[in-house]
């Protein structure tokens, strides 16, 4: 028997052995998973019995027994969610508050600075259920976590608790984010308390950093209550920072501040297409008809979104604007002809 043939035989034997080991290992994992699942179900059932007994007798949870037996924050959070979905009534809500205060929050404080990111994530999720003022520093720590999931969960806590220190940290972090990432900050701020907006306005009026000011404007634009005013907004529209300029334009547009029209007119003359585009829309929303008629030269802009907004701004003012568009219908510039044909009926 040649050496090559022996090597081939041994290789086949080794490969079959490895396959057999993998199959055996997969079955062992299935068995282990079955027993782990069974143990969790038994544990869950025991937890429900404790809850049921407490609700029937009207007594409080035996928190010492719970703390000794259940240390997995993830499991407790899942069970609380299931109990919430079961609609167990006011009695459960009272027990729930006590359970979170006595068991969940102490575990969350312990996990907040864990080296393992899944534990930090569970801590952040626990704080979204409820948190106290003493948890402020832990939430800020989680807000600065490099893991996006943890960062997002901590942002939800800021919306609920919204202390001055937490909101300031939120704004500082937002100010360093690129444009698209800031959308997440905007979404999580929906429904924040009125007093939080008051603090954001106060931070805006005191801040000197352009990115911080821009972040404040972006958050104030989300406000649906009484109007806000900032004494520096007109200067910010003319800022050399495109981000601050755009944020200030969005702010005056939302507040319907017609006194901002002169500054917005100046912004249209800038080179940054994003600034120009937002300025056009602002003039339209502020009802500056005479000034909108002057944007016809932007129909030939190299940037399609500028052409698009200029054309729709002209159309929005009625016959005067449509007449200007008709004058460009036979333009030698292909892009001008296309945008005019698109917006005119």
Image: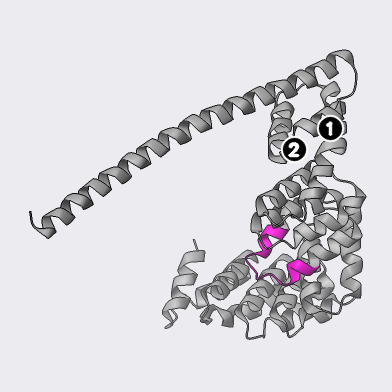
**Residue beneath the point at 58% across and 83% down:** 297
Can the viewer see residue 112 in this picture?
yes
In the image, what residue occupies the spot 44% across and 72% down?
Answer: 338
Secondary structure beneath disc 2? loop
Magenta-colored span: 172-185
Up the image or down, 101 lies above or below 202; here it is above
Q: Give the CA distance from mark 1 to mark 2.
A: 13 Å
Q: Secondary structure under badge 1? A: helix
Q: Which mark is residue 71?
A: 2
The percent coordinates of residue 312 (x first, y second) are 58, 67
Disc count in the image? Answer: 2
Q: Earlier in the sequence, mark 1 or mark 2?
A: 2
Q: Residues within 10 Å of mark 2 (few under 14, many from 20)?
A: few
Depicted 111 relative to depicted 269: above or below: above
Decide which of 216, 274 is in the foreground and name it. Answer: 216
Residue 95 colored in magenta in the image: no
The location of residue 326, given as percent across then percent down, is: 51, 73
In the foreground, 57 or 179: 57
Residue assigned mark 1: 99
């Amino acid at each position: 028997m040649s050496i090559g043939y022996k090597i081939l035989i041994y290789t086949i034997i080794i490969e079959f052995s490895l396959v057999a080991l993998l199959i055996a290992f997969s079955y062992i994992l299935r068995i282990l998973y079955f027993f782990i699942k069974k143990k969790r179900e038994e544990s869950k059932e025991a937890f429900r019995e404790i809850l049921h007994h407490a609700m029937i007798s009207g007594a409080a949870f035996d928190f010492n027994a719970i703390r000794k037996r259940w240390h997995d924050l993830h499991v407790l959070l899942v069970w609380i969610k299931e109990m919430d979905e079961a609609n167990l009534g006011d009695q459960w809500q009272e027990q729930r508050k006590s359970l979170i205060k006595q068991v969940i929050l102490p575990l969350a404080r312990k996990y907040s600075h864990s080296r393992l990111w899944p534990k930090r994530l569970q801590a952040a999720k626990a704080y979204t259920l409820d948190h106290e003022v003493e948890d402020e520093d832990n939430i800020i720590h989680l807000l600065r976590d490099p893991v996006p999931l943890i960062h997002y969960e901590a942002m939800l806590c800021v919306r609920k608790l919204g202390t001055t220190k937490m909101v300031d940290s939120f704004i500082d972090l937002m100010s360093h984010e690129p444009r698209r990432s800031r959308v997440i900050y905007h979404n999580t701020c929906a429904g924040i308390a009125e007093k939080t907006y008051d603090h954001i306005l106060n931070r805006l009026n005191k801040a000197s950093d352009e990115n911080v000011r821009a972040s404040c404007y972006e958050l104030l634009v989300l406000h649906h209550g009484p109007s806000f005013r900032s004494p520096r907004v007109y200067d910010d529209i003319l800022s050399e920072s495109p981000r601050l300029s755009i944020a200030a334009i969005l702010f005056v547009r939302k507040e319907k501040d017609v006194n901002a029209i002169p500054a917005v007119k100046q912004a249209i003359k800038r080179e940054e297409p994003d600034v120009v585009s937002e300025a056009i829309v602002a003039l339209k929303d502020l009802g500056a008809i005479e000034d909108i008629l002057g944007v016809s030269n932007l129909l030939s802009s190299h940037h399609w979104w500028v052409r698009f907004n200029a054309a729709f701004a002209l159309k929005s003012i009625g016959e005067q604007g449509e007449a200007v568009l008709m004058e460009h219908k036979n333009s030698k510039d292909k892009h001008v002809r296309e945008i005019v044909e698109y917006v005119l009926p």
